Image (spheres, rainbow, N blue to C red):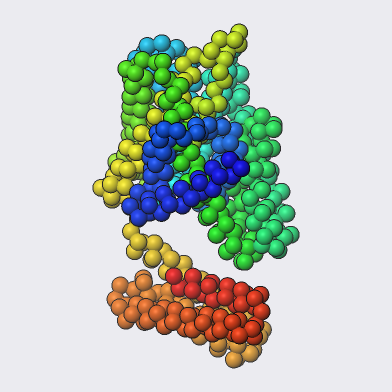
Amino acid sequence: MRSAEILVGLLGAVTVLAGLARRLGIPAPIVLVVCGLLVGLIPGLPPVNLDPNLIFFVFLPPLVYGAGFNSSPRDLRRQARRIGVLAIGLVAAATAGVAVAVHLVVPGFGWPEGFVLGAILAPTDPVAAVAVLQRLRVNPQLAAIIEGESLVNDGLGLVLYRLAVGATVSGTFSVLDGLGDLVTTGAGGVAIGLAAGWVIARVRRRIEDAPIEITLSLFTPYAAYIAAEALGVSGILAAVTVGLYLGARTDGLFSATARIEAQGFWNALTFILESTLFLLMGLQFREVATAIDGLDPARVTLAVVVTMVVVVVLRVAWMFTVGPLLRRLIPGDPKDEPPDLGPGARLVAGWSGMRGAVSLAAALAIPSHVVGGGPFPQRDLIIFVTFSVIVLGLLVQGLTLPALVRATGLGRAEHDDATDEARARAAAAEAALTRLDELQRDHPDERASDHLRELYEARLGHARAPMDESGDGDREHVEAFQTMREELLRSERGALHELHARGEISEDALRTVERDLDLQEARLE
């Protein structure tokens, strides 16, 4: 009963706090983490223990799958070299940079535990990156790089983490074995994801029942994750890969009804999981802070400051120096890529590298003891530093990122989105009219053809209006059409409910027709 009460309380808090974040215009992760911190400080509340397995198994597979499914394979392919340099080169550099810094500056930090901390904080977090960037309307090219990097680098970061923890626990390390694990774990995760995607795509094409299709879509990331972890390879990369594979093949996988219902389901699920995860991270603070009660406050502060400075400064410096150099040295045709990133884009990409739940889960999963029974060196300090860097990153970088995007001119204006949408609608209407000319030869029903031509020509006119700089009259016509159509839909809905109230139609008929009206109204919006 206690767990049920906590769950209901979390859902209520998530709803209120996410609504507050929208009203304030602040990314929801920031508000949720801060409120979790404040609530965690209230005396008398039971401690919140965030199980790392809960994060790795319950939260991350659907979240990274959803991010991969909604990513653009075309943009990711075009930015593949840049993403690879960040997801591999920068993760390795950050791991080494943090290890060197804390070993040289923070008293008592040895090389093994330094590399553990570095591997934990090296990868950026896909959940944090997507949750913050999706509210900023960032230039699509830059968004593809940042999101693509955060989706891929977790696999490498977690492999380096396993190697560092294993070396610390056992006291031995083999470079050759480490490189072999790195390759097999990453490649194996991708292979499992592709195999799962291939199988599920063929199953989906044989199903035409929306609830079953949506349930299968929820099962997909967990199936890929469990299969990969069972084989000892990266479950996170498997979940990302299956999302990318199926997202590139949406046509034919979902029926139209299932696609509409699945979008609503996944929007709600992603919102609940993301919001609950960030709130739980904030609530974890008291438990994390209690573990370092016996440590020197000055040493703890030094460890946090040094680590935070290294992960931020190293990333920004990499964007302007090593990253571009490596990209030129890696084989490939630069002509296949978009133009080089400007200084503003490099600065935004560097500043947007926030850490999140993956890093916290990895820190909490550090074993308590090493071989021989001794305590894992600096375990409590590593956890506290990780938590502090996550929170500081969300607060400092997350709160200033919108201003930086605006200052560098990398935000995407609403007009650009409207123009793209209008261009897409116009192309679709033109294709339909062209096909209608072909169909008339086989179906010489003039009334049907005339009715369809009138419908699509009206759609084409409405679609072209936003693209026409001088088309004020057309735009006024579209606005008048939308206003009148909304009024007519309200009249239809009112008549429908009156019939139902008089008992002249069934509940099923009411819901079916009302859903059609809702879809038409949603199209107007």
Q: Nearer the viewer, residue 211 or 523?
A: 211
* Residue 169 relative to residue 208: left or right: left
Q: Quadrant of residue 386?
A: top left
Q: Position of residue 433 (x, y in %)?
A: 53, 78
Residue 382 at least partly seen: no
In the rendered image, the vertical position of residue 40 relative to residue 168, given as above or below: below
Query: The N terminus is located in which quarter?
Result: top right
Q: Nearer the viewer, residue 432 or 214?
A: 214
Q: Position of residue 81 (x, y in %)?
A: 47, 39
Please name the residue shown 55% across and 87% down the image: 451
Q: Position of residue 36 (x, y in %)?
A: 42, 39
Please name the residue shown 44% across and 79% down the image: 486
Q: Position of residue 207 (x, y in %)?
A: 72, 60
Q: Nearer the viewer, residue 252 or 106?
A: 106
User: Farthest left residue?
Assistant: 407
- Number of labelled discs? 0
Residue 304 at least partly seen: yes
User: Farthest front residue?
Assistant: 44
In the rendered image, the vertical position of residue 463 relative to residue 54, given as above or below: below
User: Farthest top residue?
Assistant: 372
Query: The C terminus is located in which quarter?
Result: bottom left
Please name the residue shown 65% across and 47% down the image: 220
Please name the residue shown 47% across and 46% down the image: 275
